Amino acid sequence: MLDIQTRIAQLRRPKLLVNAARFGLDDYVRSQHLKRILKSEILPRPAPALMELLEIESALNTARKDKQATYSVARHIDVIIALMAESQTYAASRRPT
């Protein structure tokens, strides 16, 4: 089983999605966006949040590839933004002080 950082590093998504997500990264507010994306009132710690975001993103990517009518580019970008932000938070928490 791969660790969280390895799973994130191995993600390969279209450049357009990633670039759009990078533009939204500065506006990410964990308390607002993560609750909405995870559909939860309780904010999980970064590692569990990342695991759930990876599952959501995987399902969205499958829907994108399969050209499903239910696929939402906006939601996919939101989830990628959250993945990037939570990944930064997780990495910062793992650094020795």
Image: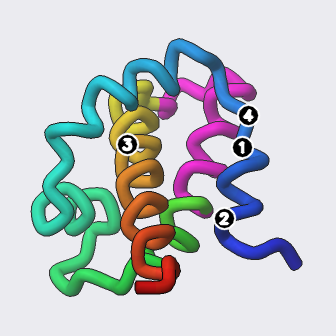
Mark closest to the chain's N terminus, 4 or 2: 2
- Tell me how far mark 3 sits from mark 4, CA to CA: 14 Å
Residue 31, image x, y percentages? 13, 68
At numbered mark 2, what does the secondary structure look like: helix, strand or loop?
A: helix
- Tell me how far mark 1 sits from mark 2, CA to CA: 10 Å
* Residue topped by disc 4: 12
Q: Is residue 56 magenta?
A: yes
* Residue topped by disc 2: 5
4 or 59: nearer the viewer: 4
Marks 4 and 2 close (CB-CB < 8 Å): no
* Residue topped by disc 1: 11
Sort mark 2 into few (<14), some (14-19) or many (20+) by Cα contacts within 10 Å. some
- Dot in front, 1 or 2: 2
Q: Amino acid at mark 2?
A: Gln
- Tell me how far mark 4 sits from mark 2, CA to CA: 14 Å
Residue 28, image x, y percentages? 20, 47
Sort mark 3 into few (<14), some (14-19) or many (20+) by Cα contacts within 10 Å. many
The secondary structure that dominates the magenta segment is helix
Q: Residue at x 21, y 60 (%)?
A: 36
**Farthest-out residue, front:** 97
* Residue topped by disc 3: 81
Q: In the displayed structure, would residue 92 be above or below residue 93?
A: above
Q: Which residues are magenta?
A: 55-71
Q: In the displayed structure, would residue 64 be above or below residue 36?
A: above
Marks 3 and 1 close (CB-CB < 8 Å): no
